[in-house]
Image (cartoon, rainbow, N blue to C red):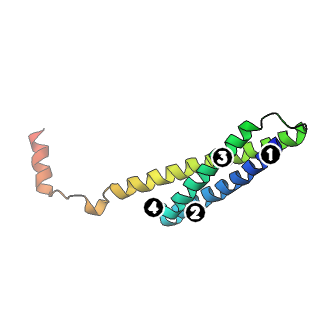
Amino acid sequence: MTSLQALQLHQQLCDELHELALAENRFLQQHQRSPDPSLIERKRALSTRLDETLAALRSTAGTDADRLALRQALDKARSRVLQILQLDKENEQLLLRFSLSSVRPSASQAPTVPPTMLQKIYERHR
């Protein structure tokens, strides 16, 4: 396999990862909870394939004569990776926000203190 072919396979996988990150983002915004196990399993499977494409890229480094096509494919792959990272960061922030909002009690669940109790506390500390 040439470097260009390995890079094209890597680019295709990056496109799949980008689509998955978009799907995860839509799910988080729509359902406001952690993704389903099927989505997480897809992410793991693509992560394993990513390791394979990276290994293929390392093993074919510098064997092509067509440097221009290789450079263009590399720039395209880098751009997609940056998009994936940005989406992943947004997804992590959404997950954090939703996990914190589910833990925090709402105003209706907060214990109410009778006004006389507050008055007594205030008078003690004057």
Q: Residues within 10 Å of mark 4 (few under 14, many from 20)?
A: some
In the foreground, 56 or 110: 56
Which quadrant of the structure image shows residue 18? Answer: bottom right
Q: Nearer the viewer, residue 94 or 24?
A: 24
Pointers 2 and 4 in contact (CB under 8 A)? no
Residue at position x 15%, y 56% from top? 115
> Residue 8, percent across and down?
78, 49
Where disc 1 sits, the SS reads loop
Label 3: element kind: helix
Query: What residue is at 39 percent from the left and 52 percent from the top?
Result: 100
User: Mark 1 = which residue?
Assistant: 1
Decide if residue 23 is on the left or right side of residue 80. Answer: left
Q: Amino acid at mark 3?
A: Glu
- In primary-sequence order, the first of circles 2 and 1 is 1
**Callout 1 amino acid:** Met
- The disc placed on residue 64 is none
Q: Earlier in the sequence, mark 2 or mark 3?
A: 2
Q: Mark 3 = which residue? A: 52
Q: In the image, what residue type sits under mark 2?
A: Arg
For marks 3 and 4, give the CA distance: 31 Å
Relative side of 1 to 124, left or right: right
Q: CA distance from mark 2 to mark 1?
A: 36 Å
For label 2, the residue is 26
Amino acid on which disc 4 is placed: Arg
Quarter holding the C terminus?
top left
For label 2, the crowd category at 10 Å Cα-Cα, with few meaning under 14, some 14 to 19 and many 20 or more, is: few
Which numbered disc flags the more N-terminal residue, 3 or 4?
4
What crowding class fits label 3: few (fewer than 14 Cα within 10 Å), some (14-19), or many (20 or more)? few
Disc 2 and disc 4: Cα gap in Å? 11 Å
The numbered mark, 1 or 3, whose residue comes first in the sequence reads: 1
Residue identified by numbered label 4: 33
Rendering quarter of residue 121: top left
